[in-house]
Amino acid sequence: MAKTAFITGITGQDGAYLSEFLLSRGYRVFGGYRRTSSPNFWRIEELNIMKDIELMEVDIQDTGNLIRTFEKVKPDEVYNLAAQSFVAVSFEKPVLTGEITAIGVTRVLEAIRIVNPRIKFYQASSSEMFGKVQETPQKESTPFYPRSPYATAKLYGHWLTINYRESYNIFGCSGILFNHESPLRGIEFVTRKVSDAVARIKLGKQDYFEIGNMDAKRDWGYAKEFVEGMWLMMQRPDPGDYVLATNENHSVREFIEHAFSFVGTTLEWKGSDANEYGFDAKTGKTLVKINPKFFRPGEVDQLLGDYSKAKTVLGWEPKVRFRELVEIMVQRDLDRVSRLG
């Protein structure tokens, strides 16, 4: 008999890829999305799975709504991917971030506890919880030190999942995912901002783009691979917490340089700090500018994940590495921009 999965935040990058993966495994997939003036379905439309999933308006700030939803759907597995997930916005909207990204987890877990405690639960935790890193690389036992309202909210959800696991014997697992990117990433995130801008510059649709801290280093993997890790966690006989990462980190500067290199442009740099800029070595044209408005109040300088537990226990490891990931993203944006004209 086919399993049923419910995904909160199904319209996001991970929700779309996870839906695609679960459908390939024969699941019946339900997804909760937030009522807005213009529902954001472009990712699941791009994967051509709109007709195969069952979408429902769900409010993660309403426990009663979640209870009624789970009673109707009767899921075997719930994947909680809903969040206010943009770190910069969390500094501007810390209370909203807490309501959705932290307290939202409580509401989902309470709904599971009330409706059917045997439902398996996955919580999308984040490498941002490590923040001001206490050891390198970071693994499941590394102490947390969040540096943003977003990271702090994620830490609440992470520990609450452990609490419900231990208090109510709920199968609750957390994936501590390091940065995972793809062509389905939102344009507000730095990697997609870069890939889109490089494509537009290459095709003559844009002159330059502005960026914040180029020297922050992240462990960047491919989101399409990471969702399989989520599923593998839910298939274990016992719940646990797992880091998913690549065990490599690269700076934003490296991401920009390789993106331009992929389209045949050699980027060179001049100046320092906020006055630094990147230019085309061949033409001298300025292509990248620094704008201090994109700096974070509390910066996370570098993240580097140790995924050895996931490899040993789950049999999961990344295949797509940094350079290939950059090329996948830039190529898809080149195709998009060309198609739109």
Image (cartoon, helix red, strand yellow):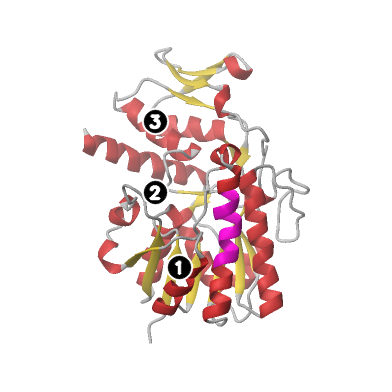
Tell me which residue sits at (66%, 72%) in the image: 164
Q: Name the residue under label 2.
A: 184
Residue for badge 1: 65
Left or right: residue 235 versus residue 280 is: right
Task: Provide residue 153's location: percent of width, then percent of height.
Answer: 63, 52
The residue carrying mark 3 is 197
Instruction: Look at the image and tell me in which quarter the N terminus lies.
Output: bottom left
Q: Judge by depth and name the residue closer to the eye, 144 or 207.
A: 144
How far is mark 1 from mark 3, CA to CA? 40 Å
**Circle 2 residues within 10 Å: few <14, some 14–19, many ≥20:** many
Q: Which residue is drawn at 22% across and 39% down?
A: 339
**Frontmost residue, 137 versus 140:** 140
Which kind of residue does numbered mark 3 sit on?
Ala
> Dominant secondary structure of the magenta stretch?
helix
Above or below 217: residue 179: below
Q: Is residue 147 left or right of residue 96?
A: right
- CB under 8 Å between discs 2 and 1: no
Can residue 43 be seen here? Answer: yes
> Marks 2 and 1, Cα distance to the nearest angstrom?
28 Å
Classify residue 67 as left or right of residue 275. Answer: left
The residue range painted magenta reads 97-107
Q: Residues within 10 Å of mark 3 (few under 14, many from 20)?
A: many
Q: In this view, does 3 lie above or below 202?
A: below
Of the two numbered discs 2 and 3 on the same chain, state the one appearing first in sequence.
2
The quarter holding residue 205 reads top left
Q: What residue type is labelled 2?
A: Leu
Tell me the SS state at disc 1: helix
Q: Is residue 330 magenta?
A: no
Q: Which quadrant would residue 215 be assigned to in this image?
A: top right
